[in-house]
Amino acid sequence: MDAPPSLEVPTSRPLLGRGVHAISELEASSKLALVCVAIGWFFMNTLVASLGSLQHGVRFFDMSAIIADPTRLFFGVNAPFHRILFGLICLACLLAPLAPHLELAPYLRQKKSLWLCYAVPLALMVVCGVLLYVRTSGDFFADPGDPNSMTGSLMHFANDLVRRGSDMVSRHIAVGSGAYLAFLGSAVLATQGVRRFRR
């Protein structure tokens, strides 16, 4: 009696092996740029708030908590949900430049648009910067329909007061070295991705 044919399906390379292979395919400058972005996002301060001799730094993976409540920049970030969720988003964006080098389906691997994944870390930084600017420069109190009413005058006064206070506070906020390092690394990655996309 013949042995039944094997039902084993040939397996492809494991996920970790594909990731290591994708990293090995990166140019040396891309690897260095990814390391710079990772260090800038997770190990160095992106923003630094200083009041007298006291300094408080915020890392990039805390940026969603700062956008949600800008006062956390001075009083510390105690938002584990924001930190974990945005940290995972940062990690996914950091791994996005590996997409063109992964062993994907043949029709996906041949798509030129995959090279634009190199620009994902830069896009995340720009979006966070714009959101933080919009969040801190807009009116804090909603203006009622009638500006001549007592409520409208009070809201206008409160917004003026907050705006003047935020101008004074903004003098005590500086961009940290982590932001410069990560921005430089992500700009290098984006440039390389666009260059390969145009090829």
Image: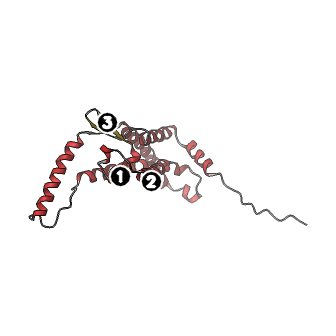
Neighbour tally class for label 2: few under 14, some 14-19, many 20 plus, Cα within 10 Å: some
Left of 140 or right of it: where is 105? right
Q: Which residue is mark 2?
A: 85
Crowd tier of the residue under label 3, counting other residues whose Cα lies within 10 Å: few below 14, some 14–19, many 20 or above:
few
Q: What residue did someone put label 1 on?
A: 127
Can residue 199 be seen here? no
| Distance from Cα at disc 2 to Cα at disc 3 | 26 Å
Query: Does the image show residue 163?
Result: yes
Q: Nearer the viewer, residue 104 or 95?
A: 95
Label 3 sits on residue: 55
x, y percent for residue 24: 58, 42
> In the current view of this chain or complex, which residue is farthest to the right?
1
Q: Indicate which label's residue lies in the foreground, 2 or 3.
A: 3
84 displayed left or right of 179: right
What's the residue at 52%, 40% (across, down)?
Answer: 27
Residue 145 is situated, as x and y percent measured from the top left of the image, at: 15, 67
